[in-house]
Image: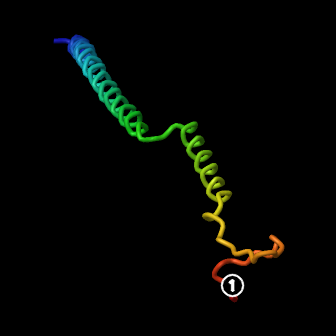
Amino acid sequence: MNIRRIVTVGAMAQLTRQVVNGRRRALLERSRRRRAAGALGVLAGAGLAWWFLSRGEEVPAWKRKKERREARRAAARQRNQAAGPPPEVHVATNDDTALRVPVGERKH
């Protein structure tokens, strides 16, 4: 047999092997990529679901603002409210009404 013929047959066998293996490798890579993309999609979906569900506990900004405003108004109302009824006073007969003395401080 001729050496040139042996080299040619070997080269053709190698090329055939590369083509077959290349197709198989391409199919494997495609399926691996598809699996990886699916896994990433599932992880991204789980992350988004967790993010949206964890935000459910948050109070909207407009509601927080309204609560702060109501708290300020209640505090102002409490500050402006009188500290109970005015104390009882004693006014001596025939005295000026500006000279009122609280009942507990009377001297007679």
Give the image quarter of residue 63. Answer: top right
Q: Please state if 82 lies on the left or on the right of 49 as rendered.
A: right
Q: By what rule are the colours in the image chosen?
A: rainbow
From this viewpoint, which residue is outermost toward the bottom? 107
Give the camera-side residue of 42 and 22.
42
Query: With respect to residue 72, does 83 lie above or below?
Result: below
Q: Amino acid at mark 1?
A: Arg
Can see residue 51?
Answer: yes
Quarter occupied by residue 99? bottom right
Residue where numbered disc 1 is placed: 106
Instruction: Identify the residue at horizontal 74%, vertical 74% (top origin).
Output: 91
Q: Give percent across and percent down for residue 42.
A: 31, 28
Q: Residue at x 83, y 73 (%)?
A: 96
Is the C terminus in the top left, top right, bottom left or bottom right quadrant? bottom right
Most distant residue in the front direction: 94
Q: Residues within 10 Å of mark 1 (few under 14, many from 20)?
A: few
